[in-house]
Amino acid sequence: MTEVITTRREALKGCALAGAAALAAGAGLSAAPARAAAALQGPARPVIYRFGFGAFEVTTILDGAIQLEGPYPIFGEDQFEEDVKAFAEQNFLPPGMMEIAFTVTLVNTGEKLVMFDSGNGAGRRPNAGHLRNLVTEAGLSPDAVDIVAMTHFHPDHIGGLAEEGAAAFPDAEYCFPSTEYDFWSPPEVAEAEATARVGKLVQSNVVPQAEKARMIGGGDAVVSGIEAMDAFGHTPGHTVYHVESEGKRLLLGGDFCNHYVMSLAQPEWHVRFDMDKDGAVATRKALLSMLAAERIPFVGYHMPFPAVGYVEEADGAYRYVPASYQMNL
Ligand SMILES: [Zn+2]
């Protein structure tokens, strides 16, 4: 096929040149130089998606993405490497490399603009950490964010809370899951080797905002229509948010499942980033079961952008069904 096209294009180009030469000869001019080929532009990908949801408006923003070795052993670290690699290939994924994307969600209730998590911030630029600029590009300004509600305190979620030592969303109040705050905020967590990386970022980005924060737990409302749900396992205080407006429901799932194939098809496989493996498995299965049974869409922080999809149950496992035009109707 390529050869045919090439041949045809060459043939056409030959005709055009011959024609130009004939014209030039006729006019007594030399042939003009060939036009330069269009420059390669590099990859382009969507980074902002918005849809109406009842009386609310939901915007998802891609803070960025990183590429790294995986899915094994990040996903399925308790499995045989060759099994995980074969499962990846079976699902049209390369066995040795993967991408992790970061999607932040903003919900405008008409009264309050609520943002969920904050992206990576400066620590992961240039690959990620673009949230603040993109909030502006999305027609909302960082100053307009009324509340930042956190799912948990891992760096890819709290990194964007501060920018050059100041609050990145200066007029915002915060909702911090109280269990998460109590676990990470003691200064000694930033000293212990195993927790130092996260602990230090919590000290610089989270603790300074505590006086503007409401400490919340499962069942607490962020604003009317948005309620926190405990989702322990990934971290001690991992929290998801149930959004409801005019009878429509949406779950903002944070990191309860972190790979659109592995986490859904193999919810029991251990995930390196889950701090309590068994707790994370139990939470993952419970939420997947709820989403499938009640046919509720969800936004997953690490699902492929725009990160909105459904969960289908099949043979005791689950399948991610990316939203297509449902949200646009
Ligand atoms: Zn994460």
Image (cartoon, rainbow, N blue to C red):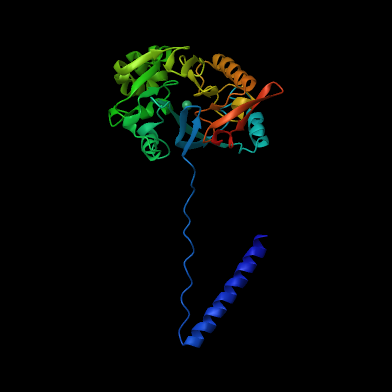
Q: Residue at x 65, y 25 (%)?
A: 318
Given residues 305 and 295, the one toward you in this image is: 295
Establish if 282 lies above or below 131.
Answer: above
Q: Position of residue 139 (x, y in %)?
A: 38, 38
Q: Residue at x 50, y 18 (%)?
A: 275
Q: Position of residue 207 (x, y in %)?
A: 32, 18
In the image, taking residue 211 as reference, residue 114 lies left or right, namely right
Q: Residue at x 63, y 22 (%)?
A: 292
Quarter of the image that includes the N terminus:
bottom right
In the image, taking residue 324 as reference, residue 134 lies left or right, namely left
Q: Position of residue 188 (x, y in %)?
A: 34, 14
Q: Position of residue 92 (x, y in %)?
A: 64, 38
Q: Can residue 312 be seen in this snapshot?
A: yes
Q: Can residue 272 be seen in this snapshot?
A: no
Q: How many tags in the picture?
A: 0
Establish if 89 lies above or below 225.
Answer: below
Given residues 77 and 276, the one toward you in this image is: 276
Residue 325 sits in quarter:
top right
Quarter of the image that includes the C terminus:
top right
In the image, taking residue 69 as reference, residue 3 lies left or right, namely right
